Image (cartoon, helix red, strand yellow):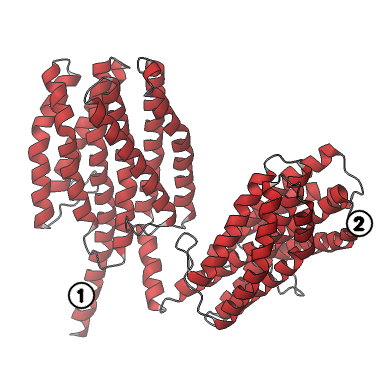
Amino acid sequence: MKKIFLVFIFLTTSIFAMSDKELAVTINLAGKQRMLTQKMSKEALLIFLGLDLDNSRKNLKASKELFDKTLKGLINGDKELGLVATKDEKIQSKLKEVQKLWEPFKKNIEAIYSYKAGDKEYEYIKDNNLKLLKTMNEAVFMYSSLNKSSSKFKLANDINLAGRQRMLTQRIAKDALQYILNLDKKGSLEDLKKSINMFNETLDGLFNGSKKLHLHGTKLPRIVNQLNVVKSKWSTTEPLILNALKPENIQNQQMTKEMIDGLDEVKKQMNKAVVYYTQSLNRQKQIMKLNALINGFNAIKDNSKHIVNLAGKQRMLTQRISKLAIECKTQIIPEACDLLEKYINLYDKTLKGFKNGDSDLNLTPTKSKEALAQIDKIDKLWQPFKKAAMKVRNSKGKDLDSLKFILANNEELLKQSDKLVKIFEQEGAKRVSYIEKALLKIVNIAGRQRMLTQKMTKEKLAIISLNMTDFKEKMEKSVKLFDVSLNGLIGGNKELGLPKATNKTIKNQLEKVSSIWKQIKPFYAKEKLSKKELTLLLKANPILLNEMNKAVGIIEKSTDY
């Protein structure tokens, strides 16, 4: 009986793991079908427009054949595509519904790429592509809702909506072409705007999560990096769409082609992201199982490090705001006054987030009485500080009384912000292992480096631009502490309680910081700087801060150092 039970566990576990993989592949390919309905419609319109005819015909035929093969694979299974036919009767019924819509749609597509089509065939595609898309979309959502109560549902839905982004690029292209060709101009423009908004909303949700879209969001570096590529491509493509639809550009085929090429590139990069989602399924599942096995230990751990990271950023912002206030006065960096407002708002938002929670920042309301008391103490200091900083910003640095207030009070705000970091670190240490305690400390110290990049630069600016020589000793201490801590983060430092960095990714990032630091460190030692040298230092400073911030982010997400 015991042997039979063990065999049963082995078999059911194997089936479960296999079905996870099948589910990921199926949602990906079923999701591609949605995209293909719009891609075929777009390619048909390109033929109608006479744009890049040979490639448009070739692409349309290939899209038709892929849709046909995948649909058959979803219904009956296809080893080559990695598809296994589902036994879910509702999904099978929905796929048969798709098939009924597909058969006449396919015949009209074949007529178009064979040059046997008239207005009637193009009209059919225009009138029926959204119905085919809608029905296929219903099937995809049915797949993504399988085993909704299990851990894989979150990932399934993310794969589904990431896949939908591919479709939206082609839907936007189709709508734009219909608008250009004066085919249901009003309806096409409305649908295009709706699709653009949906693309933007979903992209943000894939990064940060979305309650509305039931998106979990991701912190997996490989996916995040690829989504950043998508974001970059999309940011250059969206203006091309709007530009191509201006009345004066409607007949400009070059602009139309640039828009289509841009959308196709976004689709290509979005497809890579979907592939990475599907490849991460088993790894995600293992992590989720481990979390459940150890009673949510990892979730607590990650949250503690995240809170310490954000609290550490607050320390940095006290100094960045102070530095920007001086820069705003000197006008060496023209955008300093505008940046001042940005970071005032960020400090304010994060401080409120610690107390009340903030989904954007992934913060839940603080329950610690000690932390809440400290937050209130900080807020009393922050309100007049914020008021003074905004006065500097609004006066473009001419309000010298407010600037003096900032320079006289920023270190007290820094001191109290630092106390909050330590409270959060101590609170987190109560809930985690010895290794995690060490990592919390490292996040704190690495986070302090960000603050020091701003503090020593603020002090250098005060000496040079405001002739405040009493800042010299403070600056020298800041430089020394940054130097010692950076070396300790890389090579270890017993006095600071820092182990040697052995995680290759962390070490490489810290060495990148060290390389930048070595180039700008001499500027702090130099008694006088020319305007060119000072400008160079102020431009290099945010780069040093950004790379140090990346290091802290990597440490926060790592389980080893």
Q: Position of residue 501 (x, y in %)?
A: 66, 64
Residue at numbered disc 1: 8
Q: Quadrant of the C terminus?
A: bottom right
Name the residue: 7% across, 39% down: 100
Q: Is residue 171 visible?
A: no
* Numbered disc 1: secondary structure: helix
Count residues near mark 2 (Cα–Cα under 10 Å), then give few for <14, some for 14-19, many for 20+: few
Question: Total of numbered circles in the picture?
Answer: 2
Q: Residue at x 60, y 51 (%)?
A: 342
Q: Amino acid at mark 2?
A: Thr
The relative height of residue 271 versus residue 341 in the rendered view (above or below) is above
Residue under label 2: 469
Count neighbours of disc 1 (C-alpha within 10 A) and say few if under 14, some if 14 to 19, many if 20 or more: few
Residue at the (18%, 43%) spot, across then down: 134
Q: Position of residue 188 (x, y in %)?
A: 26, 30
Residue 477 horizontal side relative to residue 504, left or right? right
Which of pointers 1 and 2 lies earlier in the amino acid sequence? 1
**Residue 507 placement: quadrant:** bottom right
192 to the left or right of 553: left
Q: Pick whichever, 430 or 337, lies toward us.
A: 337
